[in-house]
Image (cartoon, rainbow, N blue to C red):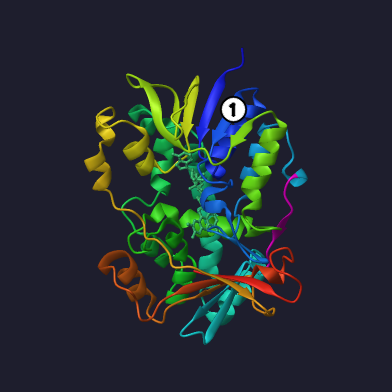
Amino acid sequence: MKRRVAVIGAGPGGLACALLLAGKGVDVTVYEKQTQVGGRTSAVKLGEYTFDRGPTFLNMPHILENVFHEAGLRLEDYLDLKALDPMYTLYFKGGTEQFTMTTDRDRMKETIERHFPGNGEGYDRFMAEQALKLGKLMPILQTRHDRLTDYLSPRVLTALPRLSLGRSLYDVLSDYFTSEELKYAFTFQAKYLGMSAWECPGGFSILSYMEHAYGVHHPIGGMHQVPLAMQRALEELGGTVQLGTGIKQLILNGKVVEGVILESGQHELFDEVIVGADFAHAMNHLVPEGVLKKWSRPKIDRKKFSCSTFMLFLGLNRTFDAPHHTIYFAEDYEKNVREMTQTLELSDDFSFYVQNPSVLDPTLAPEGKSAMYVL
Ligand SMILES: Cc1cc2nc3c(=O)[nH]c(=O)nc-3n(C[C@H](O)[C@H](O)[C@H](O)COP(=O)(O)OP(=O)(O)OC[C@H]3O[C@@H](n4cnc5c(N)ncnc54)[C@H](O)[C@@H]3O)c2cc1C
């Protein structure tokens, strides 16, 4: 008989697990409490306009290609991905200094030299050294680490010297660039993790490297097309996605999970259950209190959450000749980041991000209009 697996949550994480399992012949059911797939990667539809709720770009399409490939499918049959060149435009000093980022290494180095003479060499060194760092890190990121001894494997030990342990992301970038703007251009990615570049571990310098090495990609229709593509592929392989079906609790036999209790009260038994919901939510709500002492409610409540965002979804009755992705840095960026992550104040001088996908993608707004996203 086929193994039966339940996945809680139809975000990209849960759907990727489901697709990989379905490709191996497992009988998979995905339970999603919302009425659409995608989670944070879902869509907001307002009248004739469509917006991505959270994510606005895909960085390493080969990882998504691998998920489809492992399931015996081709990503290009499900998704129309466009690589962006330039990747994004950065504005500094109240919008008076503009800087365009590209994956074309010659053009990027030439731009760096023009704006920040003497820093081109640092860019070459950054790209070469981060390639080695990612090469060491990637196999670790793609290996399970569920026992303490996994952290002592030769793979982890040989990677240690490259992980910039004990240094912040900002410190690491200071090894390559003398200009503050350039350091910001290669460290603002810490905000993807809700972190400050001055606190974020230096190992995360791979984030900006990944953008410069693999580019920034836009799926036509928006990022929420990624989970929709996964849902379609999963259903073709015989998997099931039950929308509007929340899970109330896990069914436990001691510490072994044997199934799920739906919000309706119905019990469903499975061989395995994968939780794709937020960890803190799952531990506080899906696991009965007292079962997992390591993740008790008080312990989770003591954890610090990353910061949330203020978003504008603007349906506009005209088009704009503005870049696809633009980031405006506060004049005093360090102060702005400190206010967001340490003193928790609303900044007078804040940074913001604008996405104008209608320059490339006609599906998000009617002709002559545009859908703009501001964060
Ligand atoms: C503003 C913003 C911008 C971002 N920008 C980018 C970007 O540009 N590029 C990028 O790659 N990433 C970006 N991200 C991150 C990306 O959105 C997430 O990494 C990704 O969506 C996580 O996927 P997930 O499946 O782990 O979780 P989620 O997307 O959070 O999905 C979890 C799902 O579980 C469901 N669920 C929870 N509890 C239950 C329950 N009890 N029963 C049933 N269902 C349940 C939820 O409804 C949800 O659908 C951004 C995030 C935000 C918020």
Does residue 287 appear left or right of residue 65 in this picture?
A: left
Element type at marker 1? strand
The quarter of the picture where the N terminus appears is: top right
Q: Residue at x 58, y 38 (%)?
A: 16
Near-viewer residue (235 or 100)? 235
Query: Where does residue 38 sit, x and y in percent of width and height?
Result: 57, 48
According to the picture, the residue beneath numbered tag 1 turns out to be: 28
Q: Which residues are magenta?
A: 78-85
Q: Residue at x 51, y 40 (%)?
A: 9
Near-viewer residue (222 or 169)? 222
Does residue 297 appear left or right of residue 6 in this picture?
A: left
Relative to 277, does residue 167 appear above or below in the rendering? Answer: below
Q: Residue at x 69, y 78 (%)?
A: 319
Near-viewer residue (111 or 314)? 314
Near-viewer residue (112 or 222)? 222
Query: Where does residue 86 sit, x and y in percent of width and height?
Result: 66, 69
